[in-house]
């Protein structure tokens, strides 16, 4: 073949390759569907979301509906992301394409209150109540209705915090509350793990974009749209930092905003799920009415019994019967039902709420308590 024809064919082939490469480089993928592995889950249980659509797609942004928004770097669609909802409710999870990927899709998820497996009630014997072993599933390994120190997964301090009568074992309501606290701790560990995964994903994305390794992302390094860049560039300096690309740090539950806690009158202590630090300021706003005995007229609000009577053997004997009380870790119980000013935490520990009564088995009703913690500087 003549040389000039060969050169012409090669030039034509190269031109075709360049056109194809240019066309591919200009392609954009799109997310058109997101599905959950279940329509209904319990709080604290892992659920998997799968985003589907057309490639290329280098990142997907998920808004979970509970205040958490995370952008995940991905290699292609479909992509799967695992998540754990901490609170019950009905949420709409929205998946959006980022960078070279467009489109949006959503899916509803219903999250139920976490439940413990049912336990067969133990028969009453030796003066013990029939419900002594209730709530012991998971901690009571030998099934004797008691949780001893060698069965407890935590340290001595956490065990003693649940051993209200200081008899060296957990039983009855102590086990029920310990089970709830353990479930809350595991959920908190799951949230911490998710936070670490999100931070690792942000770091990977930042490193991939920061081609010159100068610790910032300029507009020419950004692989997304201009609108996305400007939305992330909070201080409008035309560079992105790790803090601007990363997800916002979650606010601790109960910190600087109210958390609602339902305090049942027939439960000795209710675990609020809130850990406080020494000198934190804790505010309580309680409503509701309970009954303190089988007498229908023996009523009490959070401020105490309408009769004003006192019980010498109650946790806070100097306060009125039925008043809302609290303790922090192993601290002495104190009256909060009549306080209007914030309480300064006397120590570090978990916050518990209860009813000032010596016998709780015949109580009925619930207090609704809004707890707000103003965090003290470290």
Image: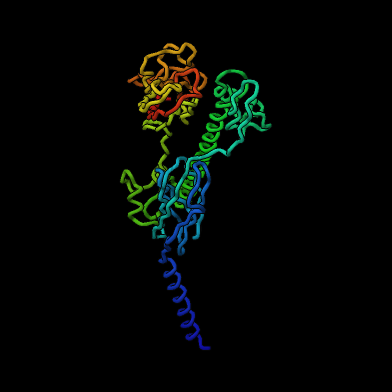
Q: Position of residue 96 (x, y in %)?
A: 40, 55
Residue at x-position 66% and y-position 33%: 141
- Percent across and percent down for residue 212 are 45, 51
Give x and y (percent) for residue 325.
Answer: 43, 20
Task: Tell me how the rendering is colored.
Answer: rainbow
Quarter of the image for residue 289 reads top left
Number of marks in picture = 0
**Rendering quarter of residue 103:** bottom left
Residue 325 against residue 117 in the figure, above or below? above
- In terms of depth relative to the viewer, which is nearer, 61 or 83? 83
For the C terminus, the quadrant is top left
Q: Residue furthest left?
A: 236
Q: Nearer the viewer, residue 70 or 273?
A: 273
Above or below, 224 against 332 in this view is below
Q: Is residue 65 above or below residue 261?
A: below
Q: Residue at x 37, y 24 (%)?
A: 283
């Amino acid at each position: 073949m003549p040389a000039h024809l060969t050169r012409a064919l090669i030039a034509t082939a190269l031109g075709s390759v360049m056109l194809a490469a240019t066309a591919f480089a200009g392609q954009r993928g799109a997310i058109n569907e997101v599905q959950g592995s279940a329509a209904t889950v319990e709080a604290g249980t892992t659920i998997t979301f799968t985003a589907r659509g057309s490639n290329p797609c280098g990142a997907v942004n998920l808004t979970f509906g509970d205040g958490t928004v995370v952008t995940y770097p991905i290699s292609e669609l479909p992509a799967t992301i695992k998540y754990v909802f901490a609170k019950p409710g009905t949420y709409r999870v929205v998946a959006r394409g980022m960078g070279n990927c467009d489109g949006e899709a959503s899916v509803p998820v219903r999250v139920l209150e976490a439940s413990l497996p049912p336990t067969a009630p133990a028969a009453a014997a030796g003066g013990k109540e029939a419900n002594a072993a209730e709530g012991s599933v998971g901690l009571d390994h030998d099934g004797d209705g008691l949780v001893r120190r060698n069965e407890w997964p935590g340290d001595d301090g956490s065990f003693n915090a649940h051993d209200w009568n200081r008899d060296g074992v957990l039983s009855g309501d102590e086990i029920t509350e310990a089970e709830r606290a353990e479930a809350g701790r595991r959920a908190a560990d799951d949230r911490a793990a998710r936070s670490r995964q999100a931070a690792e994903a942000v770091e990977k994305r930042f490193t991939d974009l920061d081609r010159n390794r100068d610790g910032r992302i300029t507009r020419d390094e950004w692989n997304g749209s201009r609108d996305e860049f400007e939305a992330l560039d909070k201080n409008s300096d035309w560079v992105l930092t790790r803090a601007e690309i990363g997800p916002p740090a979650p606010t601790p539950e109960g910190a600087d905003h109210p958390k609602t806690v339902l305090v049942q009158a027939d439960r000795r202590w209710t675990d609020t799920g809130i850990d406080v630090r020494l000198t934190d300021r804790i505010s309580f706003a309680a409503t509701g009415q309970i009954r303190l005995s089988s007498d229908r007229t023996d009523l009490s609000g959070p401020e105490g019994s309408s009769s004003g009577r006192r019980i010498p053997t109650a946790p806070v004997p100097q306060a009125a019967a039925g008043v809302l009380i609290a303790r922090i870790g192993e601290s002495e119980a104190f009256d909060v039902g009549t306080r209007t000013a914030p309480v300064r935490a006397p120590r570090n520990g978990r916050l518990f709420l209860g009813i000032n009564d010596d016998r709780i088995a015949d109580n009925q009703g619930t207090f609704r308590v809004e707890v707000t913690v103003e965090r003290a500087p470290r």
